[in-house]
Amino acid sequence: MRASIGARQALTSPPELLEFETSTTRLELYREVARISENEAGQAAQALVLFPVSQNGELVAAPGFEARTDLLQSPDAGAPLQLSFDGRSSERWPEDRRESLQGLSEREAAELVARTLLSRWRIAPSGVVQVDRASGAPYAVAYVDGILRINPAFLYMAAAQGPASQSGAVQ
């Protein structure tokens, strides 16, 4: 993958391509996604947005997040969310651990990102949230009708932001 690839193009590519990119490239893509999320926040999702959510019967762009936000640090304050990964979709969440996901499996990374984003978006579902794997989707994460669809390519971007990527940085 070229360094000049954009975040939207990376999301529609197979996640395996991002897995083997450098952490610097994945971090730049994550920062681009964060900037886009802040720019799109609250807009009606008439055009493609990276984080569409259904709200009061309408599709809008979810609240944005800053580029320094570590989405693998799940807040889990208050009532815990009930998540289900036994997908209705044909795509199963891989359970094997990946170095480029800070040693987590895609399923574990998806759980942390799901909990973090649903909390940040102030979504408090009354029942179980189905978490589906949506590789190649033109968005990063979508929440519609109680189903959270996560693009696994986004997980590889988000994992580049965490503490493992900053081990040499001065805090």
Image (cartoon, grey):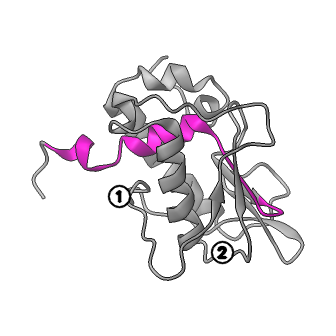
Residue shown at the point (56%, 34%) measured from the top left = 153
Q: Does any portion of residue 52 appear in the rendered image? A: yes
Which of 107/169 is in front?
A: 107
Placement of 90 over or under 68, stated as above or below: above
Q: Secondary structure at mark 1?
A: loop
- Residue 160 lies, in percent from the top left, at 36, 40
The residue wearing badge 2 is 123
User: Residue 166 colored magenta?
Assistant: yes
Query: Which dot, 2 or 1, sits closer to the camera?
Result: 2
Disc 1: CA contacts within 10 A as few (<14), some (14-19) or many (>=20): few
Image quarter (top left, top right, bottom left or bottom right) of the C terminus = bottom left
Residue kind at label 1, given as amino acid type: Arg
- Residue 149 lies, in percent from the top left, at 70, 48
Question: Magenta stretch?
Answer: 144-167
Q: Does any portion of residue 4 appear in the rendered image? A: no
**Residue 133, image quadrant:** top right
Which of 73/34 is in front?
A: 73
The residue wearing badge 1 is 68
Placement of 127 over or under 117, stated as above or below: below
- Residue 44 lies, in percent from the top left, at 80, 66
- Residue 143 lies, in percent from the top left, at 73, 59
Residue shown at the point (54%, 80%) measured from the top left = 79
**Residue 92, image quadrant:** top right
Q: Secondary structure at mark 2?
A: loop
Which of 168/81 is in front?
A: 81
